[in-house]
Amino acid sequence: MIAIIDYGAGNLRSVQKACETAGAQAVITSSPEVILKAEHVILPGVGAFGDCMRRLEENGLPSIIEETIHHGTPFLGICLGMQLLFEESEESPGVSGLGIFKGKIVKIPHRDGFKIPHMGWNSLHFCKPCRLFTGLPFNPFVYFVHSYYMQPQDPSIIAADTEYCGTLPVALNQDNVFAVQFHPEKSGDVGLNMLKNFLQTGGNCHVS
């Protein structure tokens, strides 16, 4: 069973439907007990970094997310759900993120001819082997909607990047934690195959 963490963000039903299409039972929940018992956990997210952190804290979920990750449960952050895994974001100065990874979230730099937010289809460049990308075509296209991107302190966690106003890291993987800036649930067969790959990931490795 997949637990999709519910903290008042939108787009949860589309993530749930994509998981069901990929062959999994998925529940939208804010229950710590359900999240901790789940075989896989997804943290989706749309909205502002600060608002979403506040909602997580109001529901007592930051410690549950940390426990889930350190227990070795396969975990997937999507869009803002990826950004929340870091220590801070330029979008919400003074607000602490989950701090699973050291680093911060920064604004996409302005560049003539490019619109921000970055919205639409862009191709991925794989930076290292990652279970999510098994069987995918070379430089697959996925769907983005974002104005910020990650700057991890440890670049070895970057699993894929894309070109938009420069090179932007847009996916990470360390042990049982996967996170993507794009939306697999809106990325057609490519995104569906990523979710299927995630479902096949076992919970036998841990973020140190």
Image: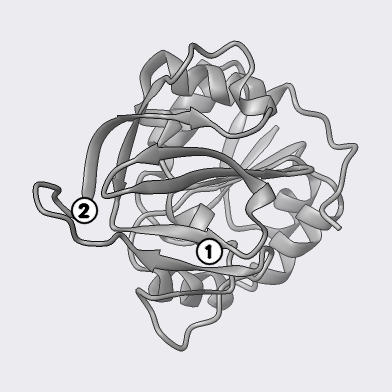
Where does label 1 land, which residue? 84
**Percent x, y of residue 109:** 27, 62
Q: Which residue is mark 2?
A: 117
Q: Nearer the viewer, mark 2 or mark 1?
A: 2
Residue 8: quarter of image: bottom left
- Relative to residue 35, is residue 149 drawn left or right? left
Q: Is residue 180 visible?
A: no
In the image, what residue occupies the spot 77% across and 54% down? 69
Judged from the image, the secondary structure of the residue bearing numbered disc 2 is loop
State the mark number for residue 72: none
In the picture as drawn, the residue positioned furthest to the left comes out as 113
**Amino acid type indicated by mark 2:** Pro
Q: Between 125 and 203, which is closer to the camera in this rendering?
A: 125
Regarding residue 23, the answer to whether it shows in the image is: yes
Q: Secondary structure at mark 1?
A: loop
* Residue 185 versus residue 84 in the image, above or below: above
Q: Nearer the viewer, residue 185 or 154?
A: 154
In x, y percent, where is residue 65?
A: 70, 60
Report whether 71 appears left or right of 46. right
- At 43% across and 49% down in the image, what residue appears? 79
Quadrant position of residue 162? top left
